[in-house]
Each structure stands twice: as C-alpha cells, then as structure tokens.
Amino acid sequence: MGIEIEIEKCVGCGACIKACPYNAISMRDKIAYIDEEKCTLCGACVESCKFDAIIMRVHHEDAVRDLTAYKNVWVVAEQKKGEIQSVSYELLGAGRKLADDRNSKLGAVLIGKEIHKQAEKLIKRGADKVYVAEHKDLEYFNDESYSRILANLIRKEKPEIVLTGATAIGRALIPRVAVQIKTGLTADCTSLAVDPDSGLLLQTRPAFGGNIMATILCRDYRPQMATVRHKVMKEIEPDPSRKGDIITVKPTETDLKSRTRVLKLVEEIESTLNIAEADIIVSGGRGLKGPENFHLIEELAKAFGGAVGASRAAVDAGWIPYSHQVGQTGKTVCPKMYIACGISGAIQHKVGMQSSDCIIAINKDPNAPIFEIATYGVVGDVVEVLPKLTDAVKKILKK
Amino acid sequence: MNYGFTEEQLMIQEICDKIGKEKIVPVREKYDETGDFPWDIVKILSESDIFGVYLPEEYGGMGGGCLDMCIATETLSKYCGGIALAFAATGLGTYPLLLYGSEQQKKKYLPDIASGKKLAAFGLTESNAGSDVGGIQTTAVKKGDYYILNGTKQWITNGGEAEIYSVIASTNKAKGARGLSAFIVEKGTEGFSFGKKENKMGIRASVTRELVFEDCKIPKENILGREGAGFMVSMKTFDKSRPGVAAQALGIAQGALDEAVKFSRQRIQFEKPIASFQGVQFMLADMATKVEAARTLVYQAAREVDLGSKNISKISAMAKMYASDVAMEVTTDAVQILGGSGYMKEYPVEKMMRDAKITQIYEGTNQIQRGIIAMNLIKEGASLE
Amino acid sequence: MNIVVCIKQVPDTTEVRIDPKTNTLIREGVASIINPFDLYAIEEGVRLKEKFGGKVTVISMGPKQVENALREAISLGADEAVLMSDRAFAGSDTLATSLALSEGIRKTGFDVIICGKQAIDGDTAQVGPGIAAHLDIPQITYVKKIESINDGKILAERMVEEGYEVVESTLPVLITVVKEINEPRLPSLKGKMKAKKTEIKIITSEDLGIDKTKIGLDGSPTWVMKIFTPPKKEGGKIFEGSTEEVVAKLVSELQDNLI
C-alpha cells in the first residue's frame, strides 16, 4: 500500500507540487519528495506526472473475484406519499444512457406501500425492469428496512451500477447499503460516463467546495454506486409505447424490522415557490446592502412568476431563510433563467447554479466572477437597476 | 507585533476578537440606533469567562490583572466602544470592592461579578460634582446598624442594569472631600431608584442613568474601608481603572484605523485605489503611529498597576489622556478618509468618532488628567531638591 | 450518557481560490478549521451533557495536526478527545473512514453519536450513515431538533425537502445535524485553558486490532482517477452604461431571445 516516487523516472519538473491539494510534495535534491505527515493519498499527483514517476499501489484483498457476474444499471426510485419524485426520472435519463453504453438493461427499484401501479411510469421513462417491494410498513422511507431490502436485492440480482438521488432520503439510505454490501459510493456526481476502454463508470464530482473536479473510479468492487443531486441531470421524457417487466419482491419479516419510525410529517408551506422546481429564479446577494432591499428581488420574481433565491452571504446575514440558499451548502438549481442580483459569484455559489440555461448577472463590480458565466451581464447597482427592470418586465409580460 | 503577552492574555485577545467579529459587528449598528442595553452580548461575554479576567481566582476570577482587563476592553472596543463599556464599567464599579472591600464583602459580591451573573457600576458624579469630587451632595447618615442615603447621582454608566453599585456619599459635610465615604448598594434596596435614561451622542449601546437615593437604608457593614476613606477609594480606583478607559479609546482608534485602511484599498478614484495617493498614505501613517504609541503607553500603565508600583497616578493619567486624544484624532481622520461614506451611518466610522469623544471626558476630563500629570511632575521635581 | 461527536478538520474551502494563470488551487493562507457543520454537532453534544449528564468525547481521524481541532472542541465544552492517527488510515474513502471511526467509537463506548450533516471539503454526507451501518445501530440524518430523550428512546425532527419529519428511534443512535439545530457557543477562557492541558488520546490501527486490508487505500473501493479544474464557461454579453441604458439593452435581448 502507499505512494512512491520512482527516482529513476522523476525529472524534478515540479508538476506534482502544483497538483497536490495538501501541500505535501516538495523538491529534495531535484527529486519530488512526499511528506507522509501531510499526504492523504488522494492521488492527485499521480495523474499530474507526465513521466509516470509516481506510483500508487492499491491492493484490494477482498475485491470481487468475478466482475462479469455483475450486469445492468439500476436506479433507486424515490417515492413520497406514493408519488414518484422527479429526481427518479432524472436518474433514469442518466441510467438509460449508461445502460445503452454498456449494452445492458436498465432496472429500477421501487419501495413503498401499494406502489406497484406507479411502476409503469418508470418503464415509460426508460426502465426495462422494475423491482417493486411493497408492504404497509414501507409507506414512509425508513433507513433500516429500506436499506436492508435494497442490499438484499443487490446481492441477489448483482447489478453493475446503482444510481440514487442525493436527496434527504437518498443520502440517508445509500451509504448504509454501501456498507452492507461493501462497495464504493461516490456522492453528488455531476457527470457519469462509461470509460470506453475499461467499461468502468467514470464518476465526476466537485471537490474542495467546487474549486476542483475529481473523477472517481470503483474498479474492484460491485456495484459501482453513485448519487446525483436533484436537477443536475435532465429528466427523461416518457415514451408511452415502452414495455418492460415488473418484478414483485416480497420483503421478509427480518427485512421489515426497524428501530426507527416516522411519527409524522410536518409540511412547511412556503409563501414562495420552491427554488429547486422553479423555471425562473431571481437571486439576491450582498450587493443589495441590506434586508430592506430584498423586496426588490421578490418583486422581480413576482413579475416573472419565478422563485426567490439567495447567496450564502444574504442568508448568513439573516435577510432571508436558509431554504432559499443556492449553492454548495444550499440547493442546486437548474432553471431556464437565473438572475443573480448583487451576487459576486463565489465558486460555492456558482456550483449551485451554473448549469442554468440562461444566466443574467447584475453587479456593480465589472470584475465580479459571476460575469464569467453570465449569458447577459449588467454592470450597475442592483438597487437602481432592479426597479426599472421590474417595471419593464411587467410591461412586456402584460402584452 | 509581540507585546510579551502571556498565553492566557493571548487567549483573552483571541476570544474577544472572535466575539467582536462574529457577535458584536452584526448588532452594533442596531444598538447604536436604539440605545437598548446589549444583554445578548453580555451573556456571551459571561459565558466566555471574560468578566472574571482581572479578578483573583479565589473569588471565581481568572487571576489576571489590569493588563488582562485592558486587553479585553481594547479588543472589544475595536468593534464597539459602547458595548465594550458594559464590561469596562463593571470593572470600574468593582475596583473599590477589590481594593477596599473586606474579605466578607469580596466573598459575597465578587464571584457573581466574575461569572458575569451581575454587573457593577460606580456612582460618584453628581450635577454639581464631577471633576471636583468635594462638591458631592449625597449624604450618608449613620443610624444604628444602618446608613441612610439621600441624594442623586448623575450620568452613571450601567445604571439600572447593574446589580451592584459602589457609591460615594458624604458622611461629614464639614470635612469636604475628606468627609466622603464609599458604600456598596444593591439594586432593589428600598429607597434606591433610577432616573431617566440619558440620550447620548455616542456610546449609545451603553446605558447612562441617574441613581436616586431617598432615605435608602443600607446595612452599616456595606461601607467600603472606613468612614472618610471615600476620596481615597475614588482616587485609587481611578488610578487603576484609567488604563481601562485608555484601552477603550485605543480599541476605538484601532477599529477606525482598520476601517480606513480597508476602505482606502478598495475605493477607486482616478482609476486607482485612494491608498495609492500620498495624501491618504501620510494620514494613515500618522494614524497608525499614534495608535501604536498610545498602545505602548496603555500597556505600560497597566503593567505598572499589575506590578503594584507605588505611584501610578501619573502614568495612568498619561495613558488615559493620550489614548483618548488619539482616539478622537484617528476617528476624525478615518471619517475624512472615508469621505462622504464616512459621514453616513452605513459605515461604522462616524459612530466610532461619536464614541471616541466621551473618552476625553469621563473618568476625569483630559484637562484634569493633565493637571494630575503636572502635579506629579512638580512633586517629583521637588523631591529631587 | 456517553456522547461521541465525530469531527473533521478541513481546509476552509470558502477561502480556497483558483490561480487564473496556472488554473491550480491557491493553497497559501488557507486555514485549517473544524468542519463548520461539526460545530453544531459539538454544541448539541455539550447541550445533551448539560441536560442529561455524562461526557462528550470528540473523535477524529487524520494526521497529528488534527489535535488542534480536537483541542478547539474541548474549549467548546467537550470532555475528552481521541485522535485516530496512523499512516495506515491515509487514503481512506468514505467506506474505510466510516469503518475505522466505528471501531474507534466502539472502543470509547456510546449512547448517542453526533456528526455534522456533511464535511465542506468532500460534501459526501456518507460517513455518518456509514458509521451507523458498521455499528449496526439506527440513524436519524439531518436532525434540526432533538425533542426528547428518555426511556432509551430519542425523538427528533429530521429535515426533508418539504418540511420535517418527527422520527423516533431507540438508543444507541447516530444522528447527523444541520445548522438549524442550535447556535454554537464561542470558546470560553476556562475551556481554552482546559483544552491546552487536556491529553489527546492517540489511537493507531494496531490499538484497534483492525484488519489493515480494510482501511486506508487498500480498504477503499473508490479512488480518485484524476483531478482537474472545472472548465471555464464562456462569458456572454456585458452591458455597461447608465441604468436606463443597461436596462433597455437587457430587456431588448430578453425580448428577442427569451420572453
């Protein structure tokens, strides 16, 4: 185990020093030296070396011996109150492509109470097979019973790839499953692809607060599991002519055992649209100067019939509740139009909105990083620009 | 810069800086506007053990001294000189007890002060007695096991919010200043009430009220020291508390300097940050030098107090006078550098300028300080002959 | 009550910048901090101790310098600190990390284990549930309020997309907390002084008697194949001028292309 510099190959170019996110590499006698105290074996340097002088040795003692026994791509569908959540259709979109690339089938797993009627929907949206586990005790998501059922099913059916939504449910469920079957899991992937040479799943995700991207592999264990945030992948359109198989899975008494139970769900109705679902989002940041100007954001959002978002700075300052926060520690959004008002565009904010179809940025500072990704940029004080823009939008939309 | 602080003093600085940045900055404008008492910050200060930094360990304190107190006051004042005063004025109210209190009195009152459970205040000033302590009209008449207090104290910091008051009253009018005595009066004592809250120019987050005594009966054991010691108690208290006021002024000045540097680096005029103009650079250089000189004087005064030096009146007065004059100059210059922005409430420097003014006035005006310095110089000169 | 809080030392990612010339991370001046979500976990642990008695043990895995983070946790009210530090742990992915931590926690003893909802450097939110799975105990993720703990049961509010659920679980339990749960206190002077003196217990893989093939790089199914900086998106049209002008220009673009 570990990382080594092959002294004969190292030319002392220093490329690895720049690549190391932990400042663990330095030059000693013109040869790269790795400080073991600082090195976390993240592997960033290995790829940076043009001379193959850095070797990382991994020995997986309990790796899966027969990788060929694992086939097909699975998507774990999410249901609430018996309704399939849209994140599932996004996963099916991603999963369909991977299954086609691997020349395999796309399966979906649906767990709930009296849920089989919903299975057809998953087939129309690209699934070839739907595994349905039904029981009255499975009405609400339960960490223990859901994870046990899913783990048992994976052990039995041996899918090659399993995708789950990075939702409150998915993020609670899938790490438990990964531990039970001992395999790798990559969170919050923004891109999933099959490596044409190895056939492995290339799981790409932001790291270091979105400052860098990392492509993760799970070579020796199966299935290869990944979660994807809501709104990162595009939903697959339904095809009414599609056909598929529905397979009923009978949960056992042991499967259903759980030490936790949900006593009730309290829905918090918000006055404004949920930002994750909105087509148009108007977001406010520090440039608004104070909470008293936030109504300018609300008015423009209202004129567009859109939702109100905010940067972390505005939320931290207490101008607007956390549920409106867009970005790394808030929500990822992908609306048709995103209007960033007085938001400088820190990387943490950008990762949460940069896949929006059209980005409009309004900022006083012409050098603000938000302009780098804006489709349209307006250099000006938001407090002055917004009222005029709102008036203009109202006039146009009235016609 | 290395000021030779102990590990504990560095911790005090670090904690107060965190409190200032994270807790005080977001609320200082609000308190300046409303004039409400910052109980939420007081609670944070007490949870962080700051109220006990200068008090002995046997009374629940952290065992530090005047320098520890100055470090806390300076650091908090960098963010808001008004809010910092809840802490600093408690120190002023506590020093008489610390210096002249009996073992019993200390055991009774100091632990609650050290933990921040109770605030203290010092009641000396009256409408006719400020710089001239001899003019005090409030009387304390002994009757059996009690003293009966009558009179009104004016402009008392922490008045109404504090639980423990060190009050100077006359027990013998004929003797003037030599007939003064110091007493501990607890809030809630019958006959002890508070007048209206003053509407001030600056330090608006700090509360200033009248203390009204109407046949207020306090147990005779609440006297600090002996009858007639009141003037001495006051003067010794001021000797030790003046570095604290100086530290408050120093903090305000540093805060204004920081704002001026920050603004001048960001503000673009003639396509350049204004910090690149020599006119601004010279102002900043002068401001920084004055602040650093004041700091050295303040720390030296505090260290003299902690060393138990015999005559600390002169250095204490120098520190208070110089640091507060610097605070006034530096905050005024900071407003100037920020220009129009500096004059607006959106930026904190106009508040700092208003806050700075009081430090030249209270705990002995700077004219009185100069008098003390001169008196000591003359005395020292005479002793050489 | 034995309360265990898992913390991670992370680079302050809000301070991390990319050098526009070399397109690499600028590391200079980036401080190491306690993962911000873990501060809420520490505070909740200390509050539980204040309410129910017992002790709070903070545990972390990483190099020696993580001692600083653990000391800070002590200054915030934790009683004991355990650092799992061993070259054999390096390179652990979330599966191996959660295994190693679960073994460390098993040694400490536990009734309630508290984790922050995720770490800001990795953002995976996988280690908490992973620990629960390794220990085979129930979990409640995204907890925004602990309503009660009694008779060996905990009642907590879990944040979900549409509001919150009230969830009941038996003890021992692992919870992950969100920042709505409390307002972390600042360190106290007494706490800081105690933190300076507190001995940090160091645990190695050998102390745990853990199978070395299950931890570190060898115990990690996933590894990083490559790291790259995200490609820059092309900027679009920028409008400058008076407020009237820029609004007019933007509106005409919007009319032509969008609305």
Image: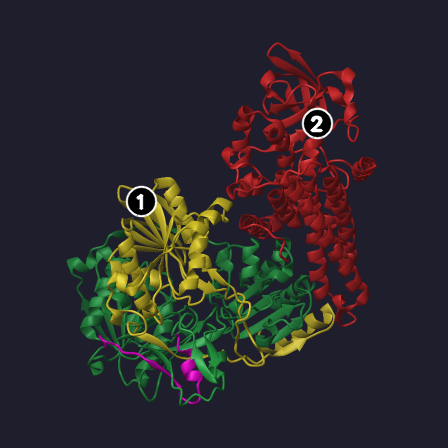
Chain colours: A green, B red, C yellow
The local crowd at label 2, few if under 14, some if 14 to 19, many if 20 or more residues have their Cα within 10 Å, is some
Query: Where on the picture, by quarter, is residue B70?
Result: top right
Q: Secondary structure at mark 2?
A: helix
Q: Nearer the viewer, residue A344 or B25?
A: B25
Vertical side of C38 occupied by B323: above or below:
above
**Residue under the point 70% across and 27% down:** B232
Q: Nearer the viewer, residue B259 or A27?
A: A27
Residue beneath disc 2: B232
**Residue under the point 42% across and 61% down:** C66
On residue A291, which mark appears?
Answer: none
Magenta stretch, residue numbers? A42-63
Vertical side of A91 occupied by B119: above or below:
above
User: Magenta includes C143?
Assistant: no
Image marks 2 and 1: residues in contact by CB distance under 8 Å: no
Quadrant for the C terminus of chain B, please: top right
Q: CA distance from mark 2 to mark 1?
A: 55 Å
Residue C57's spot in the image, x, y percent? Answer: 35, 51
Residue A132's spot in the image, x, y percent? Answer: 23, 67
Residue beneath disc 1: C1
Chain letter behind tag 2: B
Residue at the extreme front of the image, as rendered: B385
